[in-house]
Image: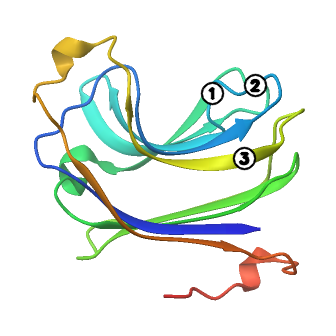
Amino acid sequence: MTRYTWLFRVNEGMTLTQKFCHFFQLKAVGGNDIATPLFTISGSRSGERDQLELRLQTSDHASWQRIPVCDWNVCQNQWLSCEIIVRFHEEGYLRARIESRDGSISFMKEFPEIDTWREGSEFVRPKWGIYRSLEDRESILQKEDVVSFSQFRIQEWSKLSSVPSLKRQE
């Protein structure tokens, strides 16, 4: 089991596109399926609605399961506390928690028995930053966008048998 915790803040006025804008990714290294992340925290435009969302590859690795976290305008310009707990395995586990300091955002979702591994992979790595498609450049209104990150913590737990018994550590 691995636990990732960090804070991030998206600047006010950052716009989204119809494609993708990832802020956190879990990506396989090695093997045949390395181009697409296993899991992301992303900004997304769906129709007229902009939102922060989780994206997970479906079991057939052909599409995304998209889970809304909150409206985009609610999460801008405030620090968000993130926690991802993951067990990398074909029958793995993933829990995502995202909360704002003021309590306006409180999201937690568990995915038991989810495929968090890709055949032939050597390992899975975390990635933080702005990973944005430029195919829809006209939707990117500002010349420069800022996403701030802070307080990274990565913990590996090798002797835990069950995640639900874990207590939140701050």
Q: Nearer the viewer, residue 153 or 117?
A: 153
The residue that mark 1 highlights is 36
Where residue 136 sits in the image (x, y, percent)?
28, 13
- Mark 3 crowdedness (10 Å alpha carbons): few <14, some 14-19, many ≥20: some
Residue plotted at (27% across, 32% down): 49
Label 2, secondary structure: give it.
loop
* Picture disc at residue 124: 3
Q: In whole angstroms, how far apart are the C-alphas of marks 1 and 3?
A: 12 Å
Label 1, secondary structure: give it.
loop
The type of residue carrying mark 1 is: Thr
Say above or below: 57 vs 150. above
- Mark 2 crowdedness (10 Å alpha carbons): few <14, some 14-19, many ≥20: some
Q: Quadrant of the N terminus?
A: bottom right
Where residue 127 sits in the image (x, y, percent)?
53, 47
Residue plotted at (89% across, 32% down): 120
Label 3, secondary structure: give it.
strand
Say above or below: 117 vs 103. above
Disc 1 or 3, which lies upstream in sequence?
Answer: 1
Say above or below: 72 vs 74. above
Find residue 101 and report its image quarter: bottom left
The type of residue carrying mark 2 is: Asp
The residue that mark 2 highlights is 33
Q: Are marks 1 and 2 in contact (CB under 8 Å)?
A: yes
